[in-house]
Structure formats: structure tokens, C-alpha cells
């Protein structure tokens, strides 16, 4: 499955937030990546900024925002199957000491709750690390106890682009 | 350090599983790779090279003493015959200067850790032989006064032969010490590995070549004057198992030779091991017959170190070597799989001690490791200690040729090592839930 702008823009979360959570992927990356080495997308790649969506929704409900993944976007294939891919950026992790399974689990749960069930969420959750730290992150995640499930997938930004955008 | 030419550079091609390796040893060098990729071969090769380079004269001397072993046997018998005996035919127990000197020489002949041969030693032996000869002839004269010393001429010829052989063995050894032929290294290497020479082998220190395949002589080292090889902490206290364990135990039994001005640096690191890690202190009791390593726990209880946990032994080895001054800025410390037998927490502590050994004392360290925590800890603790530029990582990568690996220089990037470790994780995901 590949990135689908139409599915991304058409998700119900955009209606609930009046489109406030739509963002270019580079804008989100830029905020997370102090090295600025991961801005490899075209400007017009539109994604859903889940932090922004969570802020708008929680403000409307007058409650504390839940934790969520950084972005999501729509996927489709030749058979027009649709799904939503959840992605978390971890570019500023110099080493792995702050990786915490319960925090990651919390972000996933928060994101699923936020997005609802209008479009199924892909059962593969992507964690993006700097290219030079990706294998260490994968090692760290998989050697945690309790073990992080194998559908928590560690990638670098080039792999994400290659797999879902090119 | 870190000028254009590294402190040590070892290039090797075509030796056992090593397809090619071009290693820099400028601080801490860590090689990683799967089983059978030649990591231990590299460790042993480096150890044997630097053992030969820095102990050349001693190794030549040991070989010479070995050659003189037969003469030793004959001299012993001859001396026995020469000693005055009582009416019962037994020795009368007189120990004069000659006896004492003779016994001292015999001990040198038989002992494993002889000193380097010298002209002084040769003169001493010659003088002793002369005394023996006179003593023997006198005895013959006493027992057979009618014929005096003319009973036969054989003893003279025998002594002459001994003298000639001893002198020629000494002179040959002196010649080797002078010219340092590389054959001593190559012959030893063949004995250890039972293999032909590598297809390429070059070792440099800064710009100076220590050895290559074409070298006639083995140069002296400017950077290393002692080499320590730890292939397993189980070696402590166990002797006559193999050469490496014997060498390590010899070092562990060394008396303190720490220069006074360095003592603080050493004791700080030793305290760190005692107080922050193993919660106790190791000591060596030497008596005439044996050497015993003891571990005194912080609560005062004392144990035989040989009976202690292997992790305690791992740190104890470093502590003993530190305390007796065997780890200096001219030491090459080679450790195979330092993580073996260590709890994950202690793997990190061990890495920390190694980093501090390099930072504060300047020990050059070569590690072969399989462990993600060891690799991470060496990298990140070195960064925190500001010595990251002295650290070099290598990964053994399979070549197209069967059983052959090339060692890729990763500098400070450990990602490729983790990619290889992570194959295990993929297997867990494949075979597990």
C-alpha cells in the first residue's frame, strides 16, 4: 500500500478539527529533528498532525490532551483498500535510554482513540529514528521486557519514503 | 594520538578466516562479527606479535636455555660425581660456594622464566665450569695418587665440549638479539596456528614498520612494552593449561612495579572496582611453594578467588594487573569476549573500567565482542569521557569466498554492528510469538 492524499484529507478527524491538523510532513519533521537532515519530502506531502488534532479535540472537550503518535496518513492499494498508518518521529534520541514501552503503548492507544474506526488503522506502527541510530533503536526496543511486539517497526526516514511514497 | 598516522596499524590478508583486515589501534579497538570470523585469530596473532616484539631477547634466551638442557643434565651428573662423599658413599652435606653457584646455574637452566642471557652470565658459567673441572681433577688425584690426574684424557675433552657448546649457543643468541631476525616470530606463529604465513602482513607504529612479509628483522616497538591477553577469566590461578594462561598468571603474580608518581591514578581505578563494582578486594599471597589469590568481601569475609563467581574473577584480573603495575601507557591489553560470564549490569561496568583505563592510564585496548551492551557501552561511555576519537569499531563481513571475512572499518559508527546483532531479533520474531 502507498500514501494516498485523498484518504488523508478525507479522514473524519479533519472535519472534527476543521482541517487544523493537516500539515506538510516536513513541518512536523522539522519540529522534531534538530539536525534538519531528514527533510527529504516534497513540500506538498500532506499528513495528519496527531498532536495538533489532539490539542484541538481536547480543547473542545475541555480535557487534558492524551498522548499520541506524531502523524498518520492514508494508504491505499490497487484494490482501493484503505488504511491509516501511524508514525512516530524519534529523531532527537541521541541514545536509547528514554525509550519506554509503556509510553509507546500509551501513544498508540491515544492515537487509535483519537482516530476512531472510520478507516482501519494498519496493524504496523512505525517509529522513525535517525539513520545512524536505527539499528540500535531496534535492538533496544526488541530487547525490552516485556518485549515490544514485532509490529512496532523501526525505520529511518528514507525507508519510510521508499516504502510508502516512492 | 589521532595524528595522521595511527599509533598502531595492522594489515593482514589471507590468514585462516581473515580475508582482509586493516586495523587501527589508537586507543580502544573493538571487532565484532559472527562465530568463526577470525576474531580470536586476530587477538592471538596480535598477542603473539607483540609478545615477541617486546620480549625478543627473553624469548631468544629461553630458546637458548632449552638447547642447553642436555648439557645441564650432564653437568648435574658430573657435579654429583665431583662432590666429596663420606664413608657410606653419600654426599657429606658440605655446601661450599661452588655448590651454591652450581645450583644457581642449574636453576637458571631449568627455570621457565630465565633472565635474558648476558656476557656476565656466560663468564659466570665458564668460571664455574673451570672450578668444577679443577675440583674433579683434584678428587681423581686424591683417590688415585699414583696416577694423579692422568687417569684418562676424556674428562678434559668433555669439559672442552661443554664449554664450546655453551659458548656457541650464547654467541648465537647474542647475535639474534643484535639482529632480531623475524624468523623467531614466523616460526612461533607456525607453531601456534599450524598454518602458513598470511598472504600479506604489515604492522606499523606511526610511520615505522615493525614487520612485513619481507622483513628480515623484527623492529622494536616504540609504543608497547608489555602485552596482556585475557581469553577467559577462568584462566586465573590455572597453570600449565596453555601458553596464554601461563603468561597471564605470570603477570598476575608479578610484584608491584607501579612507579610512585603514578600510584594515584592506579589506586583510583582500583578503588572504583573494589567499592563500586565487586564490593571487595583481591590480593595475592606468595610463598615458596604456591601463589594464592584471595577475595576479601566488603563485610570482611575472605574467599579463595578460584571459588568465586566468574564475574568477580573478570574484574579481579584487571584489579590485580592495575595494582601490580602491569597496565601502563605502554600496555596492549587484548580481551576476547570481555562480556562472557558477566551480568548485563557488569558488562557496562566492565566497559566503563576499560574506557577509564585508556583515558587515565593510556592502556591500548583490543576487544573482540559479540555483545550489544558492550558495544554500546564502549561507544557512549567513550563519548561521555571525551575519548570517542580514540575508539575504532570493526565488523567482520562475509566475503564471496567460503569461510572468509573482511573486516570493515566503521570508525565510531556502531549501526552496522547492531544490524548484524539484530538478525537474532528477526529470528526471535520468526520463531517466536
Image (spheres, grey):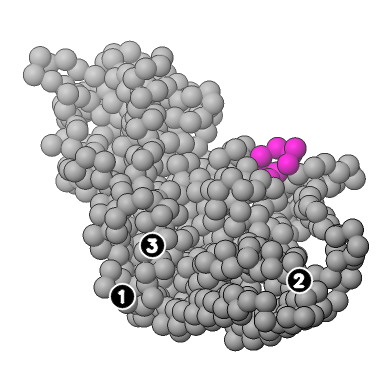
Mark yes or no: residue A82 visible: yes
Magenta span contains residue B156: no
Q: Which quarter of the figure has residue B129?
A: bottom right
Q: Earlier in the sequence, mark 3 or mark 2?
A: 2
- Dot 3 alpha-carbon crowd within 10 angstroms: few under 14, some 14 to 19, many 20 or more: few
Mark yes or no: residue A21 visible: no
Residue at image x 85%, y 63%?
B91
Residue annotated with mark 3: B187
Pointer 2 and pointer 1: residues touching (CB < 8 Å)?
no
Q: Position of residue B365 (x, y in %)?
A: 51, 61
Q: Nearer the viewer, mark 3 or mark 2?
A: 2
Q: Magenta span covers which residues?
A: B306-314
Q: Secondary structure at mark 3?
A: helix
Q: Is residue B134 above or below residue A147?
A: below
Q: Earlier in the sequence, mark 3 or mark 1?
A: 3
Magenta span contains residue B307: yes
- Dot 1 alpha-carbon crowd within 10 angstroms: few under 14, some 14 to 19, many 20 or more: some
Disc 2 and disc 1: Cα gap in Å? 49 Å
Residue at image x 88%, y 42%?
B301
Disc 3 and disc 1: Cα gap in Å? 14 Å
Q: Chain of mark 2?
A: B
Residue annotated with mark 2: B82
- Report whether B308 appears left or right of B359: right
Q: Which mark is residue B215?
A: 1
Amino acid at each position: 500500500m502507498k500514501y494516498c492524499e485523498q484518504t488523508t484529507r478525507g479522514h473524519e478527524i479533519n472535519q472534527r478539527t476543521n482541517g487544523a491538523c493537516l500539515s506538510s510532513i516536513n513541518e512536523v519533521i522539522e519540529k522534531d529533528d534538530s539536525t534538519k537532515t531528514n527533510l527529504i519530502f516534497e513540500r506538498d506531502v500532506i499528513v495528519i498532525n496527531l498532536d495538533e488534532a489532539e490539542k484541538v479535540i481536547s480543547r473542545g472537550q475541555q480535557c487534558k490532551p492524551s498522548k499520541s503518535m506524531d502523524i498518520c496518513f492514508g494508504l491505499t492499494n490497487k484494490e482501493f483498500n484503505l488504511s491509516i498508518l501511524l508514525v512516530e518521529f524519534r529523531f532527537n534520541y541521541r541514545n536509547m535510554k528514554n525509550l519506554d514501552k509503556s509510553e509507546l503503548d500509551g501513544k498508540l492507544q491515544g492515537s487509535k482513540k483519537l482516530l476512531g474506526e472510520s478507516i482501519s488503522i494498519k496493524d504496523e506502527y512505525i517509529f522513525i529514528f535517525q539513520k545512524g541510530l536505527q539499528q540500535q533503536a531496534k535492538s533496544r526496543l526488541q530487547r525490552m521486557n516485556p518485549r515490544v511486539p514485532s509490529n512496532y517497526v523501526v525505520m529511518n526516514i528514507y525507508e519510510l519514503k521508499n516504502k510508502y511514497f516512492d | 594520538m589521532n595524528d595522521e598516522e595511527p599509533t598502531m596499524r595492522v594489515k593482514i590478508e589471507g590468514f585462516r578466516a581473515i580475508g582482509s583486515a586493516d586495523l587501527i589501534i589508537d586507543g580502544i579497538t573493538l571487532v565484532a562479527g559472527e562465530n568463526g570470523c577470525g576474531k580470536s585469530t586476530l587477538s592471538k596473532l596480535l598477542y603473539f606479535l607483540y609478545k615477541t616484539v617486546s620480549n625478543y631477547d627473553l624469548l631468544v634466551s629461553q630458546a637458548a636455555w632449552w638447547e642447553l638442557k642436555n648439557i645441564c643434565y650432564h653437568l648435574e651428573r658430573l657435579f654429583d660425581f665431583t662432590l666429596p662423599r663420606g664413608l657410606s658413599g653419600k654426599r657429606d652435606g658440605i655446601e661450599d660456594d661452588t655448590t651454591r653457584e652450581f645450583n644457581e646455574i642449574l636453576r637458571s637452566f631449568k627455570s621457565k622464566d630465565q633472565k635474558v642471557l648476558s656476557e656476565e652470565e656466560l663468564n659466570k658459567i665458564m668460571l664455574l665450569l673451570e672450578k668444577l673441572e679443577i675440583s674433579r681433577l683434584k678428587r681423581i688425584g686424591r683417590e688415585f695418587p699414583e696416577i694423579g690426574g692422568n687417569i684418562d684424557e676424556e674428562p678434559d675433552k668433555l669439559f672442552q665440549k661443554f664449554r664450546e657448546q655453551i659458548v656457541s649457543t650464547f654467541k648465537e643468541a647474542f647475535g639474534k638479539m643484535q639482529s632480531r631476525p623475524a624468523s623467531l616470530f614466523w616460526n612461533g606463529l607456525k607453531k601456534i596456528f599450524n598454518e602458513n604465513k598470511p598472504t600479506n602482513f604489515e604492522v606499523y607504529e606511526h610511520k615505522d614498520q615493525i614487520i612485513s612479509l619481507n622483513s628480515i628483522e623484527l623492529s622494536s616497538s616504540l609504543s608497547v612494552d608489555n602485552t596482556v591477553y585475557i581469553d577467559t577469566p577462568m584462566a586465573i590461578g590455572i597453570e600449565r593449561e596453555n601458553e596464554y594462561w601461563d603468561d597471564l598468571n605470570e603477570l598476575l603474580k608479578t610484584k608491584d612495579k607501579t612507579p610512585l608518581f603514578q600510584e594515584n591514578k592506579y589506586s583510583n581505578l582500583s578503588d572504583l572496582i573494589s567499592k563500586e563494582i565487586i564490593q571487595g578486594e583481591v590480593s595475592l599471597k606468595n610463598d615458596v611453594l604456591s601463589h594464592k589469590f584471595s577475595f576479601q568481601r566488603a563485610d570482611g569475609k575472605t574467599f579463595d578467588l578460584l571459588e568465586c563467581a566468574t564475574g568477580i574473577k573478570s574484574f579481579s584480573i584487571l584489579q590485580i594487573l592495575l595494582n601490580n603495575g602491569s597496565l601502563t601507557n605502554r600496555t596492549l591489553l587484548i580481551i576476547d569476549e570481555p562480556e562472557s560470564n558477566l551480568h548485563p549490569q557488569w558488562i557496562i561496568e566492565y566497559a566503563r573500567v576499560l574506557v577509564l583505563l585508556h583515558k587515565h592510564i593510556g592502556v591500548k585496548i583490543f576487544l573482540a565482542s559479540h555483545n550489544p551492551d558492550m558495544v554500546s557501552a564502549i561507544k557512549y561511555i567513550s563519548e561521555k569521557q571525551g575519548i570517542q576519537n580514540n575508539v575504532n569499531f570493526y565488523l567482520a563481513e562475509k566475503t564471496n569466498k567460503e569461510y572468509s571475512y573482511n573486516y570493515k572499518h566503521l570508525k565510531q559508527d556502531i549501526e552496522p554492528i547492531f544490524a548484524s546483532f539484530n538478525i537474532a531479533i528477526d529470528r526471535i520474531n520468526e520463531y517466536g510469538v
